[in-house]
Amino acid sequence: MVSTASFKGLYFTKHALERAKERGLSVSDIWSVWHNPQGSKKASTKGAFIYWRNHQGKRIEVVAKKEEGSRWVIISVWVRRIASFQKESFLDFLIRKLLLYKLTINRGR
């Protein structure tokens, strides 16, 4: 895999840099997503992972692969709009129910 630039030890393919420019992302934005993601999953490319972070109503997704040794290379990046009607997570649902239950019990005192 040919990388053309690096930032804080993270390398970028020419393709990733082109996509970042098209999508208004800086290498700093990409590094932040890769370094501190909200989530990750396996990518369709063997050995690659997709890291993501939500920011200002958008999900920034970064595809990265570890080369032989310890060097990480960003293969591609994209931005997706987050739908405003996202399904509530189970944890959020549970917290909401527990808070409502607590409020109901406290009213009875």
Image (cartoon, rainbow, N blue to C red):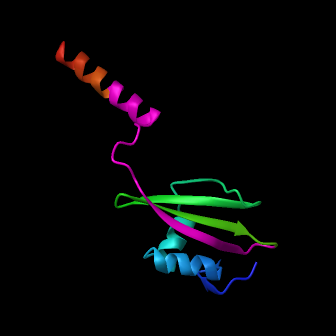
Q: Tell me the quarter of the image containing the N terminus.
A: bottom right
Q: Residue at x 63, y 72 (%)?
A: 74
> Magenta includes 70?
yes
Picture quadrant of residue 10: bottom right
Q: Is residue 39 left or right of residue 54?
A: right
Q: Eyeballing the image, is 94 above or below 34?
A: above
Residue at the extreme right of the image, as rendered: 68
- Percent x, y of residue 31: 54, 73
Furthest residue toward bottom: 4
Q: Is residue 10 visible?
A: no
Horizontal side, residue 19 vs residue 44: left or right: left
Image coords of residue 35 (percent x, y): 56, 67
Q: Is residue 97 above or below residue 61?
A: above
Q: Is residue 106 magenta?
A: no
Task: Give left or right: position of 99 versus 32.
Answer: left
Residue at 59 percent across and 81 percent down: it is: 8
Q: Residue at x 69, y 72 (%)?
A: 72
Identify the residue at horizontal 48%, vertical 80% (top origin): 21
Between 62 and 14, the one lying in front of the other is 14
First to last magenta residue range:
69-98
**Residue 24 falls in which quadrant of the image?**
bottom left
Q: Position of residue 4 (x, y in %)?
A: 66, 87
- Is the residue 72 above or below the residue 98 in the image? below
